[in-house]
Amino acid sequence: MDALNRNNHFLGAKLRNLRKEHRITLEDLSARCAEVDPQRAPSTSYLSMIESGRRSPSAEVLAVIARVFQRQASWFLDHNTEFSPVTSERAAGGAARIPFDPGFLFSKNILQAAIPELLSQTGTTGRQFAHLLIRSHQETSRNEYPDLERMAEQVGNRKFPLSVDDLMDMCRQHGLEIRWFEHKPVIARDKDAEVRSVLRSFYEPPSTIYLNKVLESDPARLKFDLASLLGHKVLHGGDGLRSAHASGGEFGESPDSGSPIHAGIEASDVLLAWRDFECSFFAGALLCPKIPFRRFLTREQHRVEAGHKVELTPAVMMRRMTKVSSYPYWHFFDATSSGHFRAVYRGNGIPLPWGNMTQAKDPCPNWAVFRMTEKKQNTSSSQLSVIRENDQWQLYCCHTLHTKDMAGVPHVLSVGVDLAAALSSNDARAADIVNSIGERCLEEGGEAMLNRAETDALRAVARILSIGWIEDALTQPARVICQRSSRCPRKGRCNTTASRRVRDIAEIKREILDQLQAASD
């Protein structure tokens, strides 16, 4: 104990910096310590006193804290004071920003005239464009909507989990009447195809919720619909200006529905899309209040499949974990078929293989969200992926689930994290590790197993973040993914179908100059 006291001058500062770097609150750290050793776990107030230097932890307590951060206890006693966060704050969102120059071409009047023309020529509906705006807003703000969180907590009192009966009672407390109806699936449009679609629920002003009886056999979806429709009453007074809940083709809250193409974008498109988003966010915050749900995820190691224990759909689990996690670098995809996204969130800046409004002709089959398209229902996989972007390798890990919506339409849901930031936070040589994985994958034809040092570094990160599917992915080879298969860095490209190599004009100019130079010589 004397040796510990003589070497703990900077212990509190190092603990605080390490905790902040991993974005773990004092409450979360205390709870994590309790999972390691309930008897010796320090309280929140005691941890605060350790960080401020007013208390010195015992060797036993320090050992518990060190285990949470996957470090040796001696690291905290190191006299090296040059420990500071190594991860710089990154721009939010996945799309690169563009300069609005020259300014006269980006005036409000010009944009108001050009955007409807752009939508009409590209076959983009007003609702699709509105969803794109909302997605960009989410990514730029890192999904921070404290007023919606606060209102959901006031309504639900942070109770977790909520039962169907709990939600029914809340609806009645807010003056809502619940009526049931029976309606079988119908055929609706989905892009250029026809698919089965089912109307699950809708709101009729001033205070009536209509629920399809098929929801009785699916409490997870029933809970989400009730929470979302309750949100409409709480947030908007139940005026009825929101979409119905539907599964399947292009109607209801689908981003593919909305005004006809020739009409461009209308105010109602933006209003309905934004209200749908607000009600959906409210539902997630009501069903999964931030602090108790974060602790649930930690206990369950962020296993999406743990949602069945608390009657939550995989989509709600994935969407909400990207918000409540103390680690900010997440992405989420919901795709109905190869090239058709229904939902996207990129808080970690991962590039899209293409947009969510049209289908690409050259998909990369190594993205998990597309590779899983043909799998059986309820199958899942975890995958490490490297992608070359701006002449640098990026490393991601995702967990992907193949499922079906209530209309029987296949969906692939995928949630993932950027691992470079977590590696840097853990004082690992992140750039060297990521580059090593990327180059070896390229050398070995597009995929490769990690070596021992890389595996150990990522396993430590997985345990700090308490994300079990990162460790699952370590048993499989990492894969090279790309945004366009025609520009894939793999030898022979990634697509199984032959495609002509894309060439740019600069390459052709160089070729001509080389030929002319050779002729003159």
Image (cartoon, helix red, strand yellow):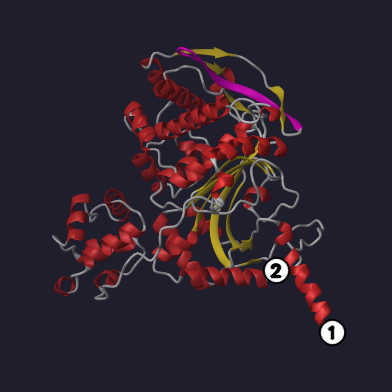
Q: Identify whether 318 is placed above or below 90.
A: above
| Quarter of image, res 172 | top left
State the image coordinates of residue 372 (x, y, percent, origin top left).
Answer: 66, 48
Q: Is residue 7 above or below residue 149?
A: below
Residue 196 counted in the magenta span: yes
Residue type, mark 2 in image: Gly
Q: Is residue 55 left or right of 172 when viewed as pictured?
A: left
From the image, which quarter does the C terminus lie in?
Answer: bottom right
Residue 283 in the image, given as x and y percentages of width and height: 45, 30
* Residue 356 vertical placement versus 42 (above, below): above
Taking depth in this image into account, of 283 and 93 the one nearest to the observer is 93
Q: Mark 2 points at which residue?
A: 445
Q: What stretch is highlighted in magenta?
A: 193-209
| SS assignment for the magenta stretch, majority | strand
The label shown at residue 226 is none
Q: Residue tagged by mark 1?
A: 520
Q: Does the magenta stretch include residue 111?
A: no
- Mark 1: give few (<14), some (14-19) or many (20+) Cα within 10 Å: few
Name the one closer to the observer, 510 or 148.
Answer: 510
Residue 137 image offset from top left, x and y in percent: 48, 42
Q: At x 32% / y 62%, what residue is drawn?
A: 18
Locate residue 104 relative to residue 193 in the image: left or right: left
User: In the displayed structure, does residue 4 sit left or right of residue 106?
Assistant: left
